[in-house]
Image (cartoon, coloured by chain):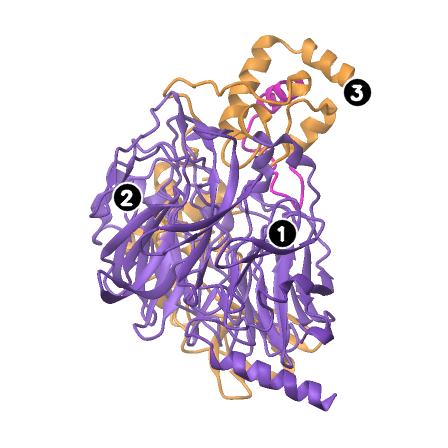
Amino acid sequence: MIAVALLLAQSASPAVIASGEKIFAQNCSVGYCHGVAGAAGRGPRLRGRSFSEDYLYNVTRDGIPSSAMPAWKGRLKADEIRAVVEYVASLASATESAPPANPMPPGVGPAAIPKFNGPPEAARGHAAFFDPTRDNCGVCHAVGGRGVAIGPELTARALKSPAELVSAVHAERSRHVLTAKLTYGQEFPALLAEQSGSQVRLYDLTSTPPVLRTLARSEVASLSENSSWRHEDFVGSYKPAELEDIAIYLRWAATGK
Amino acid sequence: MRALLACGCILFCTMLAVAEDGGTREDWPHYGGERGAWRYSALDQINRSNVGRLKAVWAFQTGKVDGGLNATPLVVSGVMYVSSSWNRVFAIDAETGKEIWHYFYPNPREIGIIYSPWTRGVAVGSGRVFFGTLDNHMVALDQKTGRELWRIDVEDMRQCGCNITGAPLLVKDKVIVGVTGGDSAHRGYLTAFDVQTGRRVWLFWTIPGPGEKGHETWESDSWKHGGGSTWLTGSYDAELNLVYWGVGNAAADFYGNSRKGNNLYTDSIIALDADTGKLKWYYQEVPHDVWDFDAAYECVLFDAPVNGVPRKLLLNVNKGGYAFVVDRTSGEFISAWPVADSINWITGVDAKGNLTGRNEPAVGKTSLICPSIGGGRQWNHGSYSPRTGWFYTTGIEWCEDVTVTPEEPKEGQNFFGGVFQLKPPLHGPPGGHLDAYDPVTGKKFWSYWSKYPLLASQLSTAGDLVFTGDPEGSFFALDARTGQKLWSFPTGSGHRGSSITYAVKGKQYIATPSGWGSALAGLLPQLWPETEDFPAGSTVFVFALPPEER
C-alpha cells in the first residue's frame, strides 16, 4: 500500500505537488483542520499515512457526509483537487513530525469573495437579498440554493416586471399566509409546513426569523385565511430602489437575463 | 430501614442548611450550576473523609463517539438532561440511569464547518428543554416527553459559517444563546428567544454596525466579518438583571492589518440588560487581537473585598492565559493575573488593565507565540468555592509557531489569516496543571500537575473536594485545601466535559461525562503523538457512596 502511494507520488510532477502544497496550506491546514503539512488537527493526520489516490480524490471532491469534511467540488477546480491529492499522497513517506511551517510570501492567500457573475443591477439585488446585517429576504426565501425555503418560490414571480414584484410585496394580502388559532386562545399568522398523523407543523410568522412550531392536531382550533398579515411589515428595511434591484436579481435568477 | 432514612434526612437537611448563595443543592439546574457559574455544590455528604469509598452506580452510553462528550449534564427533580455529539438529547432517571426519552435532531448530512459535531449542553425550564444545533437552529422540547415544540433557523449556517455548540442560558421567560463563527468570515451576535413561542425577542451584535458607538474601531468593511463569536455560555445576576457574556476573538484570527483599530466588542465581557439586550457596559481584555485569544470563557460572579471594600466582581479567564477581574456593576478593572507560565504574547497587564509588551506575530513570517491557539487554558470551566474562597482552574504550558498570511474574507468560510503548529513551552516539557488561586490577587495555593493538558471542567463541593478528569480517562477527586489526590476511577476514555453533583431522595451523586474528542483533542498529537490513539467514547458515569457509608 505504501509502495503504491509512493509510486503515485513519484509519478506526479514536482510542480503539481508544489501547487498542491500551496492549495493545501491555504485551505486544509487552516484552523483546527489538518494542521501544517497534514500534522493533524480536528481533522485526521495525513502525514506518514497511505491512502489510495482514488479514495483521496473522492473524499476531497465529495466530502464525508455527517462529518466536518466538506466537499471541495465547487470550491476548488478539478485540477486543483488533483494537485491536493498528489500532495497528500506525497506525504505518505513523511515522518511523524511536520517540518517547520514555511512562511508564505505576503499577498498569497485564498481568492477574494467570488464575484457575482450577473449584471451589476442583479449583483446589487443579490447582495440586498442576502444582506446579513439585517433581516433579509433570504431568512424566508431560497433562491439559487441560498437562503431558507420557508416562503414561496420567487423566481417564477420574477418573470413579471420589477414594478409588479414591488407591488406584490406591498399587496394587502398574501394568499399563502393563514391565521392559526390554538385551542387555548393564541392566534398567529402561519404558513403550513407539514401535517402528519396527529401533528401539525406551522411556521409562526409573528417575528423573524419564523419559528417552526410543532403542535398536536388537538391544539389547533382552526386554520383560516389571513387578512391582517402584511408582507410589507417585514421588508421595512428595504428602500424602494433596493426592492427594484431585488426584482431584477430574481428575474436574472429565473431566466439568466 | 426507617431509622436509616431518618438518619439520611437529618444529614441531608443539615447539609442544605450550610448551602451558600450561588452553589447548587439537589438539582444542577443550569450549565454553570447556578447562573453565577461557580460550578460549586453545597452538598457535603461526599467529602474528604469518605470520598475514597466512592463507587460507580450506573453508566449511560449516548451511542455516538465522534466528537467525544463535551457536555455539562443538568439535573432537575431527579431527572438528568444531557446532550451529546450530533445533537442527541437524553432524559435519564438520575437515580437509576434508565432512559426516560431521547431526541435525535435531524442534522443535515453535510455540516461542512469546523465547529462540529460536539455540543456542550442544554438548558431546562418552563417545562422545556432547549438546545442549539450544529446547523444553527434553536430547538425547544417538551421536558416530560422529549417531543419537539418549536425550532428556529437562527441564521443560514452556510452564510454565517457559524452554528451553536454552547449551552443556552435561561433567564426569566427568555432563552439566550450564542453562536460560534469566530474563525469564520462572520459577524457575531447573541440572541434571546421567548421560551413559549420561540419568537426572537432581542439580538445584540457583538460588532457595532454603522452609526453605533464602537463602529469606529473597525477599518472600512471589516466589521461585516470581524468574528466576535459568543460560543460558550454566559452568566446572570438577577439582582442587577444583567446578562454577562464573554465574546470571542476578532477575525481573521492572526492577520489584523485589514481591521486596524480596537475591534470592539471582540475579546470583551459584555453586560446586557436581560429584558432588552441593550449594552450596559463592556470591558475589552485584548484590543485588536491577532493571536486568537478569546474572552469567550465563563464569567464567574462572586463577591469579595478589594482593598477592604466589599465588591461585586466578575472573573473571566481568557485564552491568552490571563484571568481578568472586573466590577460587575460597572465593568471597572480590578486585577489580572496569569494561569500559565509560558506566556510571551504580552509581558503583562498593568495596574489599569492595559496590556504591556505586545508581541504581535509578523505578517509573512513564522513567530513563536506562547501560549498556543489552544490557550493558556482551554474553554473547560473553572470552579469557585465559597468555603475556601478560592478559584480552581487549569493552565496549559505550550507554544506554537504562527505563520501569518494576509487573507480576504470569503462569506461563511474559514478566516484565520495564517496557520499554526504546536511547539513545546519556553521552559520545560509541555503539560498541564490544575491550581487553586485567590480569585482577586491570583495568589496560588497549590498545583496539581498533569502530563497532558487537563481539558475537563472543575467541580468543587462543600465536601471540600475538587473533581475533574484527564485525557487518559481518569476521573479523580482532589482535596480542595491541599490539592492531594484522594480518589480516582478509570472511565476508559478521556475527559472533555464537565462533572456535576446532585441528590435524589437524600443521596448525593457525582456524575461525569467521559469521552475523548473535539478540536483540541485532535491537535494534541502535534505535541504528544501517542494521544492520536486515545480511545473515543461518550458515556456518563455516576458515582455514590455504598449504602453503609451514608
Is residue A87 found inside the magenta-colored segment of the image? yes
* Label 2: how many Cα within 10 Å (few below 14, some 14–19, many 20+): many
Which chain does the numbered disc 1 sit on?
B
Do circles 2 and 1 both sit on a common chain?
yes
Judging by colour alone, the chain drawn in purple in this rendered image is B
Amino acid type at mark 3:
Met
Amino acid type at mark 1:
Pro
Is any part of residue A147 visible from this angle? Answer: yes
Judging by colour alone, the chain drawn in orange in this rendered image is A
Q: Residue beneath label 1, please?
A: B108
Q: Residue B37: image x %, image y %?
A: 44, 63
At 59% from the left and 64% from the top, the residue drawn is B73
Examine the rendered structure and indicate whether residue B538 appears above or below residue A84: below
Task: Say if mark 2 contacts mark 1, CB within 8 Å.
Answer: no
Mark 3–mark 1 Cα distance, whole angstroms, equals: 34 Å
Q: Residue B542: image x %, image y %?
A: 68, 64
Q: Residue beneath label 2, please?
A: B263
